[in-house]
């Protein structure tokens, strides 16, 4: 698998849209996830809230081959 590279939130949104993913957080926490929805443990949030929360926690989206992961910025 190629190395993960940091991508913009806008590009992450494009990938998520193609894959049918939405920005979410685990209910009762600030833990962010990409999800397809439908889980009682996850709350779908706006992309603005997703980006604001991630940036405030010094998180970035990293991608490799269409697979995305939220991690602390390097």
Image (spheres, grey):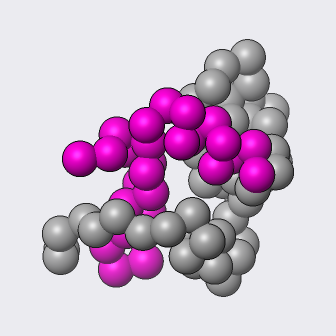
Q: Which residue lies furthest to the top in this view?
A: 28
Expressed as whole percent of the image width and height from the top left, the position of residue 15 reads 58, 77
Q: Which segment is the magenta one?
A: 48-74
The residue positioned 34% from the left and 64% from the top of the image is 6
> Do we see residue 58 in this rendering?
yes
The residue positioned 61% from the left and 71% from the top of the image is 10
Q: In this view, does 44 lie above or below 34?
A: above
Expressed as whole percent of the image width and height from the top left, the position of residue 18 reads 66, 82
The residue positioned 70% from the left and 76% from the top of the image is 17
Membership of 50 in magenta stretch:
yes
The residue positioned 28% from the left and 68% from the top of the image is 5
- In the figure, is residue 63 to the left or right of 24? left
- In the figure, is residue 63 to the left or right of 32? left
In front: 57, or 4?
A: 57
- Quadrant for the N terminus in the image: bottom left
Q: In which quarter of the image is residue 12?
A: bottom right
Q: Is residue 66 above or below residue 60?
A: below
Q: Is residue 38 above or below residue 56?
A: below
Membership of 58 in magenta stretch:
yes
- In the figure, is residue 6 to the left or right of 52? left
Expressed as whole percent of the image width and height from the top left, the position of residue 4 reads 25, 65
Q: In this view, does 14 lie above or below 36?
A: below
């Amino acid at each position: 698998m190629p190395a993960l590279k940091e991508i913009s939130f806008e590009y992450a949104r494009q990938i998520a849209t193609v894959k049918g993913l939405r920005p979410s957080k685990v209910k009762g926490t600030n833990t962010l996830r990409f999800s397809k929805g439908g889980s009682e443990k996850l709350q779908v949030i706006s992309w603005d809230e997703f980006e604001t929360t991630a940036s405030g926690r010094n998180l970035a989206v990293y991608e490799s081959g269409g697979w995305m992961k939220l991690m602390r910025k390097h």
